[in-house]
Amino acid sequence: MKVIMFGATGMVGQGVLRECLLDASVESVLVVGRSPTGQHHAKLLEILHQDFMHFSGIESELKGYDACFFCLGVSSVGMEAERYRYLTYDVTMAAAKTLVTLNPGMVFTYVTGRSTDSTEQGPVRWARVKGKTENDLLKLPFKAAYMFRPAGIQPLHGVRSKTLWVQAIYVVAAPLLSWLARTRPKFMTTSELLGRAMIKVARDGYPKPVLESEDINFL
């Protein structure tokens, strides 16, 4: 399986990339990002690309892939509504529409979050935007598309948040997070389990298109 990744330098993406590089069923990984991952591996190829609304200049390099793991995302806290919509919806759809044209047999997996609003009508702005993103991704003619909705994620194996105060919380709360990951699968998973679940779904499929934390841990 040949994989394209977006968001490989974020906390979620770091974990997914790690599992891809370890998994024998993943032949190669192409990371498309604005900054380098800093990793070196025989499977790994990186393209530095700044304009995530337009991919015409690199289209030839995006062909021939079986799966996309889209892990790019931002927090809505303190962000203007239009900016959040642009980074969450517009950027995701621009990439997905390009990829489905170039790779119609591709499986597309998108990381959203627990409480995403599929109705697009609820009171929480971020949940509505995420819901619309999910809904419109599922309408594209990919071979299959899966929406991953983890609740809490415990970073493992050196995976780190780029936000210093968030990383500090992860370090202090590590014992509690480990306990929750073992005992409360509806509310907590790990970066390792998330990455492994995404690979398995892309390779083998899953009976439903939206996966909550318990589905991720089950896989």
Image (cartoon, helix red, strand yellow):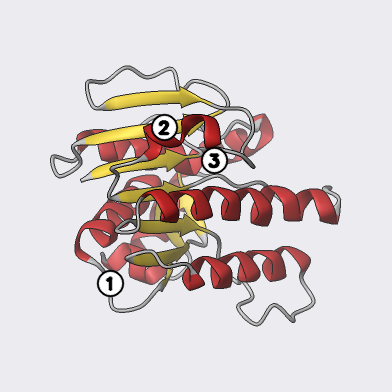
Mark 1 surroundings: few (<14), some (14-19) or many (≥20) residues within 10 A: some
Residue type at tag 2? Val
Query: What residue sits right under mark 2 in the picture?
Result: 31
Horizontal side, residue 42 vs residue 170: left or right: left
Residue extending furthest toward the left? 24
> Where residue 202 appears, x then y in whole percent?
28, 58
Of mark 1 and mark 3, the one earlier in the sequence is 3
Q: Secondary structure at mark 3?
A: helix
Quarter the C terminus occupies: bottom left
Mark 2 surroundings: few (<14), some (14-19) or many (≥20) residues within 10 A: many
Residue in view at x 25 percent, y 33 percent? 21
Q: Which mark is residue 95?
A: none
Residue 76 in view (yes/no): no
Residue in view at x 25 percent, y 67 percent? 205
Residue type at tag 1? Tyr
Q: Which mark is residue 206?
A: 1
> Where residue 119 appears, x then y in whole percent?
65, 82
Q: Secondary structure at mark 1?
A: loop
Of mark 3 and mark 2, the one earlier in the sequence is 2
Residue in view at x 50 percent, y 73 percent? 139
Mark 3 surroundings: few (<14), some (14-19) or many (≥20) residues within 10 A: some
Q: Secondary structure at mark 2?
A: strand
> Where residue 24 appears, x then y in whole percent?
13, 39
Foreground residue among 79 and 95: 95
Query: What residue sits right under mark 3 in the picture?
Result: 170
Horizontal side, residue 155 vs residue 51: left or right: left
Q: Quadrant of residue 166?
A: top right
Report how far apart the C-alphas of labels 3 and 2 lie in the structure: 26 Å
* Whether residue 200 is situated above or below residue 36 in the rendered picture: below
